[in-house]
Amino acid sequence: MSSTETLIESNELFIGGEWVAPAGSDRIEVFSASTEEPIGSVPDGSNGDIDAAVKAARAALEDSQGWSSWSKEQRADAMERLADAIDKRAPEIARRVSMQNGMPIAIATQLEGAFPQLLLRYYAGLARSVSTEEVRDGLLGGKILVQKKPVGVVGAIVPWNFPQALAAFKLAPLLAAGCVVVMKPSPETVLDSLELAEAVTEAGIPAGVINIVPGGREVGAYLVEHPGVDKVAFTGSTPAGRKIAARCGELLRPVTLELGGKSAAIILDDADVAGSVEQLFGATLLNNGQTCYLGTRVLAPRARYDEVLAVFGGLAGALNVGDALDPETQIGPMASKRQQERVEGYIAKGKSEGARVVAGGEKSEQEKGWFVQPTIFGDVDQNSTIAQEEIFGPVLSVIPYDTEAEALAIANNSEFGLGGSIWTGDKERGEALARRVQTGSIGLNHYMPDPAAPFGGVKQSGLGRELGPEGLEAYFALQSIYLEAGPTATAAP
């Protein structure tokens, strides 16, 4: 199937449960990452559109018969209907994501086409089971009602690398908590959000509960500081996250930030490297390397260093690089020309700083598309640029170590702390080491975030957690109601 078979065009924005004309006339033009040909366009949202969307969201929030006042069972039922409606559109959602950001269709079908529904159903179940009220005995002898209330209007900013999955990281728990949202997709991936909006309508989600306004950084900044927004949820780069954190700090506005990573894949001396190639691929190169939690620093014992380099070099050389819509493709293009040039710049930097190219490292052979050869660097200094900065492409740095203590020190020698993995034949040994790595999550002999576990980072990888019951708690505000005073309570004279 051609990446540009039919142009996907929209002239309206999804605000207040309806398709409405945008406030401005600018448009976002979308191009195929594989062919560089145009594939569609949508209105480019403006501050006026954010105003309208926040107004619609607040109206939905404050409606005495609206979403926030629905019973937990009603909201859970609606979320499951939304999951069913997305199921119907899953193949088209996956296709659109692949065309836009270069994600191989085999991966998009699994993650973009299925993960959002999994999250919606998971949080629907939590919505039914989680208690939102508790009566406590006060230490002064009285009774206290503690209730969890929806935090309110959420400004959700979603990146381009997993646009539907990461939207669901936010949508599913905030809906379960009774919140409403204004979501801003990235300009690189806007066509899939049209399908989401259609699913929202089919599921009978009340008007104004979910509003979608695509736009660039300026529109995102306006959403972050909008006076009608009660909480911000952002996934993206660490530099952008710092700016959002600073602004939310000034506003005393709650914020969840899932930011960059430079995770370590620690290969211990007893690991079955050759027998773990498929799992290693998923933990280091998934989605063309455009994944924040990937183990892009591979730490290998010096006694097995040449063997590890040979395995990763062979893996990189054997990967099928091609059009994202080809089911056989394992590595597709970068999401944009700018991203391609960024990754190529890091490859040049690695060479100039003395790292040895084991595989790849040259200009892509494809005539069209924003492709980068899967590249493996050996003899990498742990303090070099390619070992410290997030590249966000199919580029791995293999770093040698002598002792397990040194491997731990190298793994923790990073401003980031998002993901990671340990590869070993001894589960107890691996778990003991995992506990000492400074990171928000880590896997043994694999890595893939699980919806039941909190996901997020330490250090410069973010604030707060998504997924798991903890992801739901992030969308509640607490209120204490002192029902009665105890006999020891006294008033000031």
Image: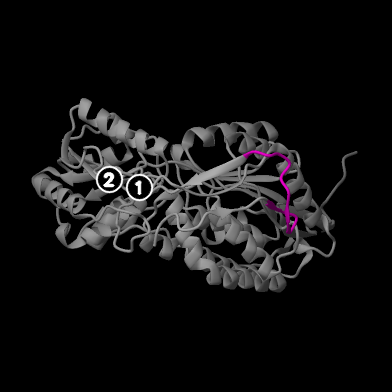
In terms of depth relative to the viewer, which is nearer, 136 or 405?
Answer: 405
The residue to which callout 2 is attached is: 366
Marks 1 and 2, how far apart in space?
10 Å
Q: Residue at x 10, y 50 (%)?
A: 307
Q: Give the label, 1 or 2, closer to the camera.
A: 2
Magenta span has 24? yes
Q: Residue at x 40, y 38 (%)?
A: 337
In terms of depth relative to the viewer, which is nearer, 433 or 70?
Answer: 70
> Looking at the rendering, which quadrant does residue 106 occupy?
bottom left
Magenta residue span: 12-26
**Residue 203 vertical placement versus 5 (above, below):** below
- x, y (%) of residue 224? 65, 39
Examine the rendering and report whether any part of residue 140 can be seen. Answer: no
In terms of depth relative to the viewer, which is nearer, 440 or 170?
Answer: 170
Say how the picture is coloured.
Answer: one colour
Whether residue 153 sits left or right of residue 247 in the image: it is right
Please report whichever mark, 1 or 2, sits nearer to the chain's N-terminal start. 1
The residue to which callout 1 is attached is: 333
Looking at the rendered structure, the secondary structure element under dot 2 is loop
Instruction: Tell me the quadrant of the picture where the C terminus can be found.
Output: top right
> Looking at the rendering, which quadrant does residue 157 occupy?
top right
State if disc 2 and disc 1 touch (CB < 8 Å).
Answer: yes
Examine the rendering and report whether any part of residue 154 can be seen. Answer: yes
Instruction: Tell me the quadrant of the picture where the N terminus can be found.
Output: bottom left
User: Hey, what amino acid is under mark 2?
Assistant: Gln
